[in-house]
Image: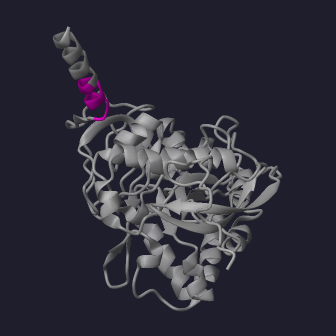
Amino acid sequence: MCSTKFTSYFLLLLLITLEFTSTSAVQCNADCKPPNCRCSSTVIPGGLAPKDTPQFVLLTFDDAVTVHNIPYYREAFTDRTNNDSCPAAATFFVSHEYTDYSLVHELYAVGHEIGLHSISHSSNTQYWRDASVAQLTDEFAGERTMMEKFAKLPAGHVQGLRMPFLQMAGNNSFQMMKKSAFTYDCSMPTRSHVSPGLWPYTLDYESTQDCVIGPCPTGSFPGVWVIPMITWTTKDGFPCAMVDTCLGMPNTTQELFEYFKTNFEQTYLTNKAPFGFYVHAAWFDVSPVHFEAYKKFLDYLQNLPDVYMVSGSTVIDWVRHPVPLSQMKSAGWSKCRKPTAPSCRPVSCELCKKEDNNFTTRWAKFCDVQCPRSYPWLQNHLGSESYGDGCRKPWW
């Protein structure tokens, strides 16, 4: 009897271990074909020639969405469209703390994509490097629950994520993505595949992408996509993945705009791999020149007949089912999500936040909900925990 119980317990542990253990990836081969598999490669999907390929531009912003940065987003994108009359879309990799969820709802309603950037956004990079599958599930699947509840996002519409500080966690983040049904990661810079650039690919097989901020994945994760962050080059020849980390940039609007164009042409004039303008909105606060050059660059892109400013998930959709540039205005491709009026009744809440054994007060704004009992956080995604007198100020 004891032997039977021990055997059953051992088998259970084995199954749990197998669930969270990836198979080592092997070299990609001809069996890997779209729509569900693609080798890491600079080859244009569908065998298209560059002249027949749309140039996708990924405009992304990291961190909290707040009343401070929303004016930038409204001014940059309102009434801006692509050549197929679909709205020019950015992807917002949103971190939880300090985010105004009513503004997240607004961004989604007007056509942008909402991705994830974690709940805690811990400043300790070692935390992210060593994070377990369970911790990453808490951080990202938990944040998706928050987005669906507090920003009223439709289930299944949050597909992508970016690791804080681009700090990879080896196989663990991709095991979490596979287990939690996320579609793509956009955290991995490439310095070796820039011009021509590396196209998005799946992790069914071994990746040929260089590992810039390891540990990088070595396992096989069928159907999980990577959008490589094609690095920019500074005027002194140094690579940078986030635009606001590029050193020595010009300090006039026109010169900065020309710098943007120079980096854009690394892919635009070669294999048209998706070009990324990855930035934090706080960079616009540093100098008015930054935002003026950004808007000027978007105007330039909008006037190019083969450029489409789209979300990460839209890029993945195209790579899965590539169509030539001549068909980009067809009814099949341009069934985009049109802007709608926000349907969010903002609710402001004063809440008690517990982190470790520390209690602090947070103000938060959600959509159409009663204020939760506490500030949503790790292992308390919907704020259902009650902390009693944790945040109550003494009367004296």
Q: How is the image coloured?
A: one colour
> Which residue is at the far left?
3
Q: Nearer the viewer, residue 356 or 334?
A: 356
At 58% from the left edge and 83% from the top edge, which residue is drawn?
290
Percent across and percent down for residue 319 are: 47, 41
Q: Which residues are magenta?
A: 13-20
| Above or below, comparing residue 240 to residue 194 in the picture | below
Q: Position of residue 87 (x, y in %)?
A: 71, 54
The C terminus appears in which quarter of the rendering? Answer: bottom right
Residue 17 in the magenta stretch? The answer is: yes
Which residue is drawn at the image coordinates 43% and 54% (left, top)?
186
Left/right placement of residue 252 relative to residue 274 reads: right
Residue at 51% over, 67% down: 277
Look at the image and say whether residue 302 sits in the magenta stretch.
no
Q: State the residue lying farthest toward the bottom.
A: 251
Residue 104 on image: x %, y %: 68, 57
**Position above or below: 361 against 311:** below
Q: Is residue 394 above or below residue 310?
A: below
Work out whether residue 290 or residue 178 is closer to the camera in this orientation and state it. Answer: 178
Residue 303 appears anywhere in the view: no
Between 52 and 12, the one lying in front of the other is 12
- Give the residue at x 42% y 62%: 164
Q: Main secondary structure of the magenta part?
A: helix
